[in-house]
Amino acid sequence: MSARTVELGLPARLQGRRPLIVIVLLGALLRLSWSLYQGDTVQALPGVHDQITYHTLALRVLHGQGFSFDTGWWPATQAGAPTAHWSFLYTLYLAAVYLVFGVHPAAARLIQSLAVAVLHPWLSWRIGRRLFGEQAGLAAALFASAYGYFIYYAGCLMTESFFVVAILWSLDIATAMAFPGPARGSPPRRSWTCLGVAAGAAVLLRQVFLLFVPFLLGWLVRELRRSDRREGRARVFRGVATAGVVMLAMILPWTARNYLAFKRFVLLNTNAGFAFFWANHPVHGSRFIPVLNDDDRSYGRLIPEDLRNQDEATMDRELLGRGLRFAIDDPKRYLMLSLSRAKEYFRFWPSGGSGTAGNLARALSFGLFLPFMVIGVLSVLGRCFRARTAAPSEATQSRCSGHFLLLLFVSVFTLIHLLSWALIRYRLPVDGVLLLYAGAGVLWLARRSAAVRPLFCKGPVV
């Protein structure tokens, strides 16, 4: 056996990562099992009906018909008409898999499940180790691997799994760039390029992330200027410009495609107007109805008659204007409606509208981990607050600033959906970040238990 090998055949550099490898293998087993159970068909499972749309759209792209449908399609796309409602990037992923392996949804599921099983816990471990310590990072990776919702969506042909990974990738790069290291200096250009690719991928999967990008870049500028004043402002802003250019390079080809398809400017997707209009329609009153499926108040029937023959881009723009008018004309109702969405967004208790499997998944995912998430957040906030008055080290300052970024994401992303459309699956990126705090929360409790305290006596404060 060579000097670079150890027991189990692992390379020497991976010897200290055996717990993480076991966690990744556990997540892979769970996700691949669920994917295999679904088989080689695409079904309208609870909460994932959109996978039928992505499968159909990928087939159209594969057969040269472009981003369109051969029949009228939800939300209000006419047969043969161009659509920009759905993620271009994820559709291309499915089309590429079908091109290589044939039209086998199982192949797309297995590739997606395996990729997410590796990347999601690995990124959770990296961020958790950096901001909480090694043990909390491993706990966060374990929770990400075993979280019921993440297992469920890993085997579904939708954007959610890759979107969560892209967001964690962006947060990992940003916190790594701002965290002090042995050779402290301005981040290399490749780091800014990678940040642009990660954020761009997140935007191409779900354009709502574009609303958080200014907060992300603003935090990074502030942190770099605070922690390394040897570097001039110009260099930091050149880095931001690099990330911005990379993102634009990923988005603008689709903007050009949309202009050719609709003869008007559409930056990326045509779904914000539909979502805001439906989510704030007076049919809700002041209490949000998560799914409108009655014949008299279905989504299609709510679209005004004068817009139904318009193209998708025109319809989206007009519906956004009318949705905003709903909010402006009755701000009190809009406020109450937005507050009522919190019930659906943070739901963890059983619901009569869900089946047994859905209720169990909800209770054993968010319901199970929510107390530890709250404990982790409160413990970190308390320690960072106390550190402000105790001349903290640069590492502690960077950790606290990193927590500010993570909790800023949780707050901004939650607010966006409470003000627009709130469903449980839209909360999954927030779950991905809060599971980092669940790991810290579990360790916080363990360190205060006399029975297990000797096992958890190491690691940074925050």
Image (cartoon, rainbow, N blue to C red):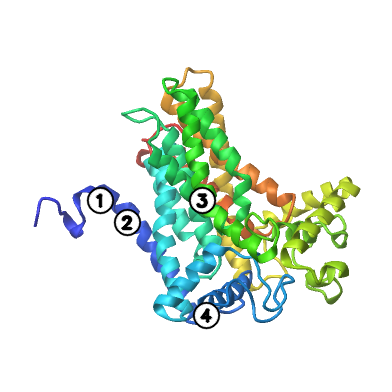
Instruction: Find the distance from the CA under tag 4 to the CA under tag 2.
Output: 40 Å
- The amino acid beneath tag 3 is Ala
Residue indicated by mark 1: 14
Q: Is residue 244 above or below residue 255?
A: above
Residue indicated by mark 3: 249
- The amino acid beneath tag 2 is Ile
> Which residue, as the protein is rendered here, is positioned at the far left?
1
Label 4 vs 2, first from the N-terminus: 2
Q: At numbered mark 2, what does the secondary structure look like: helix, strand or loop?
A: helix
Q: At numbered mark 4, what does the secondary structure look like: helix, strand or loop?
A: loop
The answer to which of 356 and 88 lies nearer the viewer is 88
Callout 1 touching callout 2 (CB < 8 Å):
yes
The answer to which of 247 and 207 lies nearer the viewer is 247
Residue indicated by mark 2: 21
Residue indicated by mark 4: 63
- The amino acid beneath tag 1 is Leu
Label 1 vs 3, first from the N-terminus: 1
Give the mark toward the camera: 1 or 3. Answer: 3
